[in-house]
Amino acid sequence: TSDRNNSMGVNLANDKALQALAEQVNATGEKLLAGNQLATPLVPGAVPSNAFLPISNPADHRQIVGQWQPADSATVEKAMVNAVAAQPAWDRTPPASRAAILEHAADLLEARTAEYIALCVKEAGKTIPDSVAEVREAVDFLRYYAGQLRTSFNPEPLPGPTGESNQLQLHGRGVFVCISPWNFPLAIYIGQIAAALAAGNAVIAKPAEQTNLVGYRATQLLHEAGIPAAVLQFLPGDGATVGAALTADPRVAGVAFTGSTDTARAINRALAARDSAIGVLIAETGGQNAFIADSSALPEQLVKDAISSAFTSAGQRCSASRVLFVQDDIADKVMTMLAGAMDELKIGDPGLLSTDIGPVIDADALKLLEDHAARMNNEARLIKQTECPEAAAHGTYFGPRAWELHSLDQLHKEIFGPALHVIRWKADELDQVIDAITASGYGLTLGIHSRIDETVDRIASRARVGNVYVNRNQIGAVVGVQPFGGQGLSGTGPKAGGPHYLPRFATEKAITINT
Ligand code: NAD
């Protein structure tokens, strides 16, 4: 949208500009591969002792992008002690000063766009356009929460009787743990941290195991912008060890988590089991996102939007379409066109501008997709399987696929990759379709293609989801424009990039003075 295009100093209005950026990104990427990039814990006073592990490029596992060092238990403890000690002074820093630091970080990020795009391409296997969107979203989060901090975090005078002055203040809750996924290693990593810091918390950030370099370099940038080292600490490590140790710690006031529904449940249990203050959990999780099209939908537009929603970022978006419900009058035509359009997708090196679909993140993700494909090939009708080029043999690639199912029950849980499922419905079955989507328990995004206002209203008002997109694709929420997040199995809310997110990281204090 125009917001995204306006949010960065880079003008990508024409192919030449994009080509120039791609050349810059690839030159930076080569330098990255040539140097030995390290991601170590950033914890003042700690001397981490764990061995380094290699970071390989998902597009070609023979390429080693760098190495990372998981935090040991003494480093986790040191980070906690540092954070507890540093938080009060950070909370006392005036909101305008905290906002200025976040805005400075946004400026630095814009100035170094090519470097962060290269990191996303090489470590996460994201295409260049996807990586551009990552940097933009991270910049937008920094500016959005900084702006909100400037306007809504100053003490608010309240009415009261003569002789009494009342005031409502917002403060940080204490130490916040931010746990992020690999699929938006920059945008979500920075978005969580920016909100937690803005509200006056000290932050311990644990990135996903697959994307430590991006997290490390993003943390360094925030420090350079002025966030004190003990107020934001970087703590890489396995979810099951470092993540679990952090969320079980009684000194933690809250956790901002984005990832799978199962992990959110584990964190919820860990927070509840502590014999300490009740911890806050802000969880953004998975989806089983549907797209509903009726017979008034324009097939060309529908297929274009379904392809973009299901396969952009190799389908590794929480918002991605997993199921396309098509009214039977147009179903055959849509499936034929879908298969044709899938033939056009270019699968390959994410560093090439011509590439539409890059690799999936790692061998575990690929195995889950291959197992799913084997089951679908038995239980459903294959509409299309795209083949990967030979050059993809050294990476973790999964050619986009589509199957026709007879029921949503055939999908047991979220399938995280370029796999689309199509289900036909008859004119009198619309309510059953909506009920089946609700019964899945997930409630993240929903796409609707219909030219009939009543149908759109009926679906949009009945559906229990966080984000509804009508007659367009269903991915790419923009900060401050489409606040993003779901309900049910898809998350707790409040929505990231929306007005209610930041206050959730804060605690309220009312002060009454008898004058
Ligand atoms: P994941 O749950 O496996 O991992 C996410 C993070 O949690 C990682 O940093 C991991 O190390 C950590 N973790 C794992 N076990 C932990 C534990 N016991 N305690 C504490 N931390 C732990 O998810 P993933 O596979 O990395 O990410 C993909 C998932 O994220 C998908 O389900 C996707 O839908 C979801 N997602 C949701 C949103 C959203 O906004 N709703 C955005 C992006 C991704």
Image (cartoon, rainbow, N blue to C red):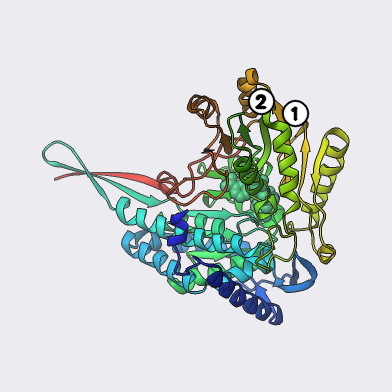
The answer to whether residue 298 shows anywhere in this view is yes
Q: Position of residue 309 (x, y in %)?
A: 63, 46
Q: Are marks 2 and 1 in contact (CB under 8 Å)?
A: yes
Circle on res. 436: 2
In the image, is 64 to the left or to the right of 294?
Answer: right
Please tell me whether residue 408 is drawn above or below residue 200 in the rendered image: above
| Mark 1 vs ligand 1: CB below 8 Å | no
Q: Quadrant of the C terminus?
A: top left
In the image, is 271 to the left or to the right of 337?
Answer: left
Q: Position of residue 482 (x, y in %)?
A: 47, 45
The answer to whether residue 244 shows anywhere in this view is no
Tell me if mark 2 has few (under 14), some (14-19) or many (20+) residues whose alpha carbon lies within 10 angstroms of its own.
some
Circle on res. 231: none
Residue type highlighted by circle 2: Ala
Residue at horizontal 70%, vertical 55%? Answer: 241
Quarter of the image where one finds residue 35: bottom right
Residue at horizontal 66%, vertical 25%? Answer: 436
Residue type highlighted by circle 1: Asp
Q: Position of residue 265 (x, y in %)?
A: 64, 40
Residue at horizontal 37%, vertical 51%? Answer: 171
Q: Nearer the viewer, residue 451 or 12?
A: 451
Q: Position of residue 24 (x, y in %)?
A: 59, 77
Quarter of the image where one finds residue 267: top right
Please tell me whether residue 31 is drawn above or below residue 375 in the rendered image: below
Q: Nearer the viewer, residue 471 or 465?
A: 471
Please tell me whether residue 185 is drawn above or below residue 424 in the rendered image: below
- Under circle 2, the secondary element is helix
Tell me if mark 1 has few (under 14), some (14-19) or many (20+) residues whose alpha carbon lies within 10 angstroms of its own.
few
- Under circle 1, the secondary element is helix
Quarter of the image where one finds residue 92: bottom left
Circle on res. 409: 1
Distance between the Cα atoms at labels 2 and 1? Answer: 8 Å
